Amino acid sequence: MLYPKFNKSRKVFNLNGIWDFAFVEEGYVPSSALAKKIPMAVPGSVNELTTNRLEKNHVGVVVYEKVLNLPIAKKERIFLRIGAACHICKVYIDGEFVTEHNGGFLPLDVEISKYINKNNRLTIVLDNRLSYQTLPIGEVNNGKQTIHHDFYNYFGIHRDVVVYTTPKDSIKDIFIESAYEGDYHKVFYRLDLDDYDDKKIKVEVIDENNEIVAVSNNLKDVLYIENPILWNIKDAHLYRLHITTSLDEYEEIFGIRKVEIKDAQIYLNDKKVYLKGFGKHEDFPIVGKANISAVNIRDYACMDWIGANSFRTSHYPYAEEMYDLADKLGYLVIDEVPAVGFNFWNNIPVFCDERVNKKTLEVHKAQVKEMINRDKNHPCIISYSLANEATTWEDNSRPYFEELVNYTRTLTNKPLTIVENNSAHGSRVAELFDIIGVNKYNGWYIEHGNLNCIHDGLKRELTLWYEVYKKPLIVTEFGADTIEGNHYLPSETFSEEFQVEFLDEFCKVFDELPFVCGEHVWNFADFKTKEGLQRVRGNRKGVFTRDRQPKMSAHYLKHRWNKK
Ligand code: BDP
């Protein structure tokens, strides 16, 4: 899947802005234009914009509508792309059903050429309900939505909506990979074209000085690049693969770098890397889960200031812009599929016919495929994470993940990560993966407030994970809720002092264990969650506040990470 780009053979029309909107009953069919409607922001999360409690907690269907009047020539092909809409999205044009997409964190991309004339009515019908056939999973009983994950179930159109054109015969997809061979770097590419004519196709690799450093006219090829400038952490050099065919043109950005797993460590360009960073969320006041460039830029500025080099897209694929910026700025990313909530925190089995079952697995596979398809060429991505904190102690989790991992390996040769909240001996699935992430809350959910319980227990548990699997081990979450401005001496939980002491206890252990390959603090910033007894204005484990100001712990980490 190619990201819509503007050039002399392709046009992009941005449909963001104000749309007509309505809450509707299930089964709504848009046979005529919305009669009762209110203005709604796209992108935006409806829950953040309404002042009405019922609307904010709406469980069910909503409608977005807009009239299109596009200056498009008949000879062009026309596509609609919705970057992300939570969760199940149906598209209609002039009342006619066009397509449906399941997955609130991945794009819907559909050709609409045959529907387009003057003044078309575009309707998007969104269902925000989570079930065992969605990711994240959830359950609706008597109109009440139950979710098992710890972030707010925002709904709405969260990312850009665009109409774009391509010529009749177009470049449909591009796959790029880079590798070493002796002093050369090899760039493999493969093109998916509507029409191939070797005399009319030109493939060029262009460097940062606009020099053409390799050329070909094949559909797939291996290009050798002498003395390339490698893509590196905070030193990100990018190349462009420029493709011209008889009718079309497209330019894909890529980096030349090598990611390897060796001796239970992660290597980038033959150098061991230690991940310093965060689990994040797409979350901001008023904006909700909408993609806003200003927030993204601020997040990278904060990550740069604090000395982070990486993050995990917990718990879903983020907007494309975040990966583009990571490519440009040199951050390592673990890209996560929205398989979260696979644990009910009681003894009810998750992996069984009534809950996470064969149908869930098909949805899970489909979203892994879409994520990899969307993100495959980003140099920032070092691994795909296939689930967060599933009940991997259940016997039935084994065949589920075996099938998922085997399937994913047919799509990518990147390392695969599982994020565990389990013991090393308890996991039925960790051995299937290349990187193991563990989330640890000793001293918070376990023996709350006891800083003395952290060191020995954590050291023992992490050592066991390493000894049992001998795979790269990242502590993918550790954190303590902290209310900014709340100071206590001696420290108490929820105070800024406690968060610093808590993180420091963890970091001491990491520094004693050379096999730990990274520390991702939970969380980069405070974020909204469902209401709950442990949540006052959401999850407060942020090192930054929700509006991206540093807590004391941010200064602690800045000091640590800028030295490490
Ligand atoms: C972990 C989850 C994460 C939560 C975090 C917490 O992976 O989504 O937000 O705990 O409770 O279990 O803060």
Image (cartoon, grey):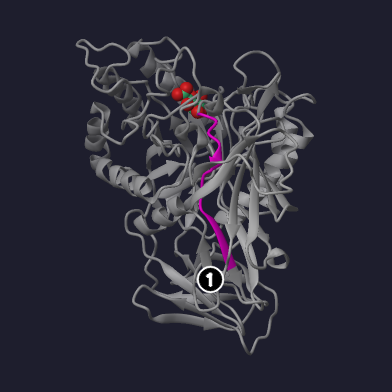
Query: Residue lying furthest bottom in this view?
Result: 199
As drawn, 56 above or below 448 = below
Instruction: Tell me where residue 561 appears, x and y as whole percent.
Output: 27, 39
Query: Residue lying furthest left in this view?
Result: 489
Is 131 situated left or right of 330 in this image? right
The part of the chain drawn in magenta is: 152-164
Instruction: Tell me the quarter of the picture where residue 138 sits.
Output: top right
Q: Nearer the viewer, residue 403 or 93?
A: 93
Instruction: Tell me where residue 225 appears, x and y as whole percent.
Output: 45, 75
As drawn, 356 above or below 37 = above
Q: Nearer the viewer, residue 130 or 63?
A: 63
- Residue 385 visible somewhere in the drawing: no
Q: Which residue is drawn at the image coordinates 31% and 32% (left, top)?
A: 544
Q: Nearer the viewer, residue 51 or 185?
A: 51
On whether residue 525 falls in the magenta region, the answer is no
Query: Residue lying furthest front in this view?
Result: 35
Instruction: Tell me the quarter of the picture where residue 302 sits.
Output: top left
Location of the C terminus (image quadrant): top left
Instruction: Tell me where residue 437 appears, x and y as whole percent.
Output: 51, 34
- Residue 229 visible somewhere in the drawing: yes
Q: Which residue is drawn at the image coordinates 23% and 41% (left, top)?
A: 563
Q: Looking at the image, how many numbered discs can be counted on the residues? A: 1
Q: To which residue does mark 1 refer?
A: 11
Count neighbours of disc 1 (C-alpha within 10 A) and say few if under 14, some if 14 to 19, many if 20 or more: some
SS at badge 1 = loop
As drawn, 450 above or below 164 = above
Given the image, on which type of amino acid does mark 1 rest? Lys
Instruction: Tell me where residue 340 appears, x and y as whole percent.
Output: 59, 31
Location of the N terminus (image quadrant): bottom right
Does the closest atom of ligand 1 sit within 8 Å of the Cβ of label 1?
no
Q: Nearer the viewer, residue 86 or 62?
A: 62
Q: Which residue is drawn at the image coordinates 58% and 53% (left, top)?
A: 66
